[in-house]
Amino acid sequence: SSVRARGSAPFFAPLRTAAPGPPAASMGQTCCTSGEDNSKITAVDELPRSADIGPRTEEVVPKVVAEVAPVAAAAAVEEKQQKQVLADFVITIVKEDGVNLGVDVDLTDGKCLQIDQVKPGLVDNWNKANPDKAVKCGDKIIGVNGKTGNAQTLTEECKKERVLEMKVLRS
């Protein structure tokens, strides 16, 4: 229905007609009635409804989502890079008389020494001094003093040498 002021007839804005005088100089600057007789224009209270015109819906996507997505993606990339940096790293252990390495290892894969447990000893001392490169349960020693590929050779190198440069793979 149309908008009504209290106690009045339906309100319709007056139609504007072209001012008398010469036509406008450029396209689009004339009244849409082009000076025709306006007495034939009828006001309509309601527009007809059609079965094919339903309510319109729009998906509203907050701007915040668009701004958060790149930040989240950047954080994921940074986290992945940090994991890759820690994927393998080198530790250096200098053996001391009477102090054990302090690790239980599993040799079953035949190629590396998988850390089963870190106990008090040289590796635990390393972990306390280097928390960013701490050796953890599940890590694999894949090289000792440049030797790789054979778990038995790695074990012998650990027993024989005083300085151990170990390449550790975080799994």
Image (cartoon, rainbow, N blue to C red):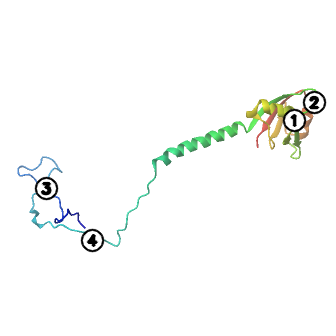
Looking at the rendered structure, the kind of residue marked 3 is Arg
Q: Secondary structure at mark 3?
A: loop
Asked whether 111 or 132 is in front, the reply is 132
Question: In the rendered structure, which disc, 1 or 4, sits on the residue that comes first in sequence?
Answer: 4
Task: From the viewer's side, name the closer residue of 153 and 140.
Answer: 140
Q: Are marks 1 and 2 in contact (CB under 8 Å)?
A: no
Q: Which residue is mark 2?
A: 160
- Residue 106 placement: quadrant: top right
- Dot 1 corresponds to which residue? 120
Q: What separation in Å lies between label 1 and label 2 (alpha carbons)?
A: 21 Å
The three-letter code of the residue at mark 2 reads Lys
Rendered image quadrant of residue 141: top right
Neighbourhood count class around disc 4 (C-alpha, 10 Å): few under 14, some 14–19, many 20 upward: few
Q: What count of labels does the image hold? A: 4
Which amino acid does the dot numbered 4 rest on?
Pro
Q: Position of residue 38 (x, y in %)?
A: 11, 63
CA gap between label 3 and label 4 equals 26 Å
Label 1: element kind: loop
Please rate how many residues cluster around mark 2, counting C-alpha atoms within 10 Å: few if below 14, some from 14 to 19, many from 20.
few
Left or right of residue 144: residue 50: left
Q: Can residue 121 be spotted in the picture?
A: yes
Q: Which residue is mark 4?
A: 48
Which quadrant would the N terminus be assigned to in this image?
bottom left
Q: Classify mark 2: helix, strand or loop.
A: helix
Q: Kindly report which numbered mark, 1 or 4, lies closer to the viewer in this rendering.
A: 1
User: Is residue 146 something one can see in this rendering?
Assistant: no
In three-dimensional space, the C-alpha distance between marks 1 and 3, rounded to whole angstroms, equals: 94 Å
Marks 2/3 in contact by CB < 8 Å: the verdict is: no
